[in-house]
Image (cartoon, helix red, strand yellow):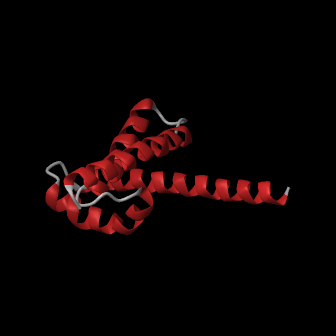
Amino acid sequence: MEYDEYMKKCEEIWGRNEKLIALFKQDISDLSEKTINNHVRYVKFYIDDFLTFREPLSVEEGVDYLNECFDYFVPQKCWWSSPHMIRSVSSSVKKFYHSMYLHLIRHVHQCRHDHSS
């Protein structure tokens, strides 16, 4: 993939990711601002940095790369990694994917309801 094509795809993904982060922030809005900011920072690392490191991957494709990220990439390539930090980042990413799953379920349910009316 040429660099310009890579950057264009990344920009599309990053734009979509901002919308998904906004949904996630709504779902965790009952937490403290500091906790929300930490979760968002950690999720952005995964979806904006890791998933576009070698090739631009969507959030949906990113499900297949969780083990690679937390078993190899973070411990080997990230100077800031520690066992505690890896647990924190993976916990935030888990919360994010759970949030996205719930939004998908609501969307599917709404579509079924709309089509049955």
Q: Position of residue 33 (x, y in %)?
A: 44, 30
Q: Residue at x 44, y 46 (%)?
A: 16
Most extreme residue toward the right, as rendered?
117
Q: Nearer the viewer, residue 88 or 78?
A: 78
Relative to 27, 109 lies left or right: right
Q: Position of residue 55 (x, y in %)?
A: 27, 60
Is the C terminus in the top left, top right, bottom left or bottom right quadrant?
bottom right
Residue 5: quarter of image:
bottom left
Q: Residue at x 35, y 64 (%)?
A: 66
Residue 15: quarter of image:
top left
Q: Is residue 94 visible?
A: yes
Q: Residue at x 38, y 47 (%)?
A: 12
Q: Nearer the viewer, residue 42 or 32?
A: 42
In the rendered image, the vertical position of residue 26 relative to residue 105, given as above or below: above
Q: Is residue 88 visible?
A: no
Relative to 58, 80 lies left or right: left
Q: Position of residue 78 (x, y in %)?
A: 17, 53
Is the N terminus in the top left, top right, bottom left or bottom right quadrant?
bottom left
Residue 73: quarter of image:
bottom left
Most extreme residue toward the top, as rendered?
33
Q: Residue at x 42, y 46 (%)?
A: 17
In the rendered image, the vertical position of residue 68 relative to residue 48, given as above or below: below
